Amino acid sequence: MTETETYELGQGTGPLRGVKVVEIAGIGPGPHACMILADLGADVIRVERPGGQVLAGGAQNLLNRGRPSVAMNLKDPEAVATVLELVRGADVLVEGMRPGVTERLGLGPEDCAAVNERLVYGRMTGWGQDGPLAQAAGHDMNYIAITGALYGLGQDKSRPHFPTNLLGDFGGGSTYLVIGILAALLEARLSGKGQVVDAAIVDGTAHLNAMTAAFVGAGTFSEERATNLLDGGSPFYDIYETSDGRHMSVGALEPQFFDAFVTLLGVKDVVPGQFELERYDEMRALFADTFRTRTQAEWVEVFEGTDACVAGILPLSEAAKHPHLQAREVFVTKDDLLQPMPAPRFSRTAPTLTTPPSPEAGADTRAALAAWGIGDVDGLVARGVAVQA
């Protein structure tokens, strides 16, 4: 028997152990949110379309770790009824379809509340459940584009640069969905009633950018890129190339950290004053020329562990080997995959990794449905309602 053929609930060890989540599979932020919930101990069952969907599956897709995959044809009323049976015993449902799709399937918030009034119904979209763009397609960079976040990104004055899909999908998206779900779960335990969590990437990204909004409101922020304290406008908060073509990050903002930085860099006697704005070009050139005299490894040896706020910039393939991350076991190799451990950490209910990503949609259909108490699973499979891959 394989591990998935003997699937059992309650494998998680984190603080959400005992919480049950039904995931209507999507891509990007929805799966990431459910990975977080599973990492923290929740029992999550991932309901996918037979055959899966592009960018959503595979044995290496870490966003799907920690939970079984069940394949069902949600255009079949019996499949919808089966999902509602899962919902009956669940605490949370997560879906990432366009607004109105789950309602048309018969799995909308009202349908689910009719069988479980305590259910927290988490909805993950880019534009939100309403508004002029609610029904339009979009991706991460589109959502962060209209919120004012993308405009200021990067140190290139001529154009913005986007940070892959970290900021929208996972920063403004899945992170806020999880926050909303956890808040609604707490409230449901007091009121006895669930509610809908409308997590929109545009909302979360705007909220993430509150500090910039404060600076703009105070009149202390220029919307020209690379002209402010934290966007590369200051030479002591920037990136510098080393002699081997690699880079160092410098974040020496406070005066005492700036002093430590220029001392260790060896330029304390010639560097302009930290806030001599008219000499910033001179300061930047001094830092750049000096960093180019040694390799990244040599500069890391000089700076690491000091209060200079300087760190070497590592690719992900090297990050797991960093001594600090090794000491904290930030990355581990499990199931032949190098992967980040659950975060954050807890003193009493430490979460641990459980099952690997399912290799294909429906790999765990029989075992997972049975574990969740669904009867006649073999009949569902025989009738094509559910698919065992």
Image: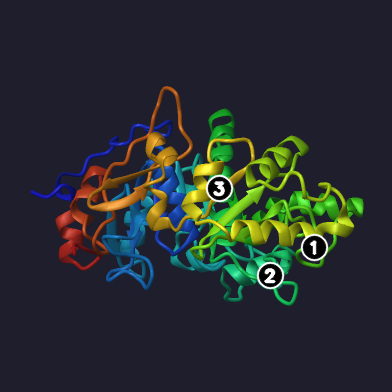
Which is more N-terminal, label 1 or label 3? 1
Q: Nearer the viewer, mark 3 or mark 1?
A: 1
Residue where numbered disc 2 is placed: 145
Image marks 3 and 2: residues in contact by CB distance under 8 Å: no
Image marks 1 and 2: residues in contact by CB distance under 8 Å: no
C-alpha separation, residue under disc 3 versus residue under disc 2: 30 Å
Packing grade of label 3 (10 A; few <14, some 14-19, many >=20) is: many
Q: What SS does tag 1 mark?
A: helix
Residue 236 in sight in this render: yes
C-alpha separation, residue under disc 1 versus residue under disc 2: 30 Å
In the foreground, 333 or 91: 333
| Residue name at image x 26 percent, y 51 percent | 356
Residue 246 spot, x, y in % from top left: 51, 62
Q: What SS does tag 3 mark?
A: strand
| Residue name at image x 60 percent, y 65 percent | 126
Kind of residue sitting beneath label 1 = Asp
Kind of residue sitting beneath label 2 = Ala
Residue where numbered disc 3 is placed: 311
Residue 73 spot, x, y in % from top left: 31, 68
Q: Nearer the viewer, mark 3 or mark 2?
A: 3
Packing grade of label 2 (10 A; few <14, some 14-19, many >=20) is: some
Residue 195 spot, x, y in % from top left: 58, 45
